[in-house]
Image: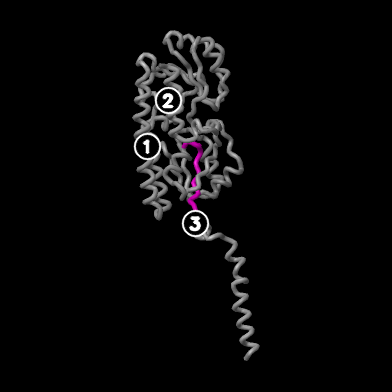
Amino acid sequence: MIASASRHLLLWILAPLILLPACESRSPQEQAAPRKLTVVTTLTVLADLIRQVGGDTVDVKALVPPGGEVHTYQPTPGDIKTLAQARIVFYNGAHLEEWIDNTIRNAGKPDLPIVVLSQGLPTISEAGGEPNPHLWLDVTNAKTYVEKIRDSLSKVDPAQAGQYADRAKAYLARLDELDTWVQAEVAKISAARRTLVTFHDAFPYFAKRYGFTLQGVVVASPGKEPSARQLTALARRIKQAEVPAVFAESQFNPKVMEVLAKEAGVRVVTNLYNDSLSDGPEANSYIALMRHNVTQIVNALK
């Protein structure tokens, strides 16, 4: 009887010690924290919009890194692995990410929800007749992207739909403020000087929304350098139109724009952003990107 009681007492003492390693494997915070929704997108710009809506409930991964060039990007085996882990994928579309469809197929998830953010929006045609893909540089289009993100996240994660709706509402209000600010800043430039010459054709939606005239681009498509004859013709057009400055995006080599600016006798700005956020703070969010671009453009043209 005494031996039996001793055995029960020993088990009572040892039981917590036996269970302790299992309990220590996860902290109370880890045990309570819900699993995040894994979201994959192509561009860092889109990743920021998704984070603004998803908050702490999403883990967003952009395939093209900050400063990367989406038009010529080459997907890696790591990208395929990342897509295989996704619960939902967002990409821009309008022929911007020509490589994405094959990459998604290679991930081997035929039922993976895919959202093309530009789909259904009116587009501006490029010289070859294809739609220009850079819709988000018009803030009203970015708002539509946010609404699509909200609805799509809510569909795959209905338990958090209320949070997605609240965060989207707050962010849409900030985008309204941004759109108003852009218009006020552009108003500081006289109508005659609201002209843009850019490295590649990324700004037609921006120009249309905010009242600029596009005078030309240096390259028809990224990766194709212009000839000396083409640069000379563009420089002549810049002089005739009395364009005060030309603009290039930070992910491209600035040398061609510097040659053009020298030949045309105008100022060159080489640190705009469109497809990619910056590594540093100057354009590390969509709103920061827009504010940075507008400040650079206004200061160069007013």
| Mark 2–mark 1 distance (CA, rounded to whole Å) | 16 Å
Q: Name the spot of residue 174 as percent of width and height, x first.
A: 37, 37
Circle 2 packing at 10 Å, graded few (<14), some (14-19), many (20+), is some
Query: Does residue 74 appear to the left or right of 59 in the view shown?
Result: right
Image coords of residue 296 (percent x, y): 46, 23
297 inside magenta stretch = no
Reading the image, the residue beneath label 3 is 33
Which element is circle 2 on? Answer: helix
Label 2 or label 1, whichever comes before in sequence order: 1
Q: Nearer the viewer, residue 223 or 102?
A: 223
Point 41% across, 19% down: residue: 214
Real-space CA distance between mark 2 and mark 3, rounded to the nearest whole angstrom: 40 Å
Disc nearer the start of the sequence (1/3): 3
Query: Which residue position is annotated with label 1?
Result: 174
237 vs 50, nearest the viewer: 50
Q: Secondary structure at mark 1?
A: helix
Quarter of the image where the C terminus is located: top left
Q: Which mark is residue 42?
A: none
Q: Is residue 241 above or below residue 88?
A: above
Q: Residue furthest right?
A: 3
Instruction: Identify residue for label 2.
Output: 294
User: Counting residues from the N terminus, which is met first, the one under dot 2 or under dot 3?
Assistant: 3
How far is disc 1 from disc 3 in space, using C-alphas? Answer: 29 Å
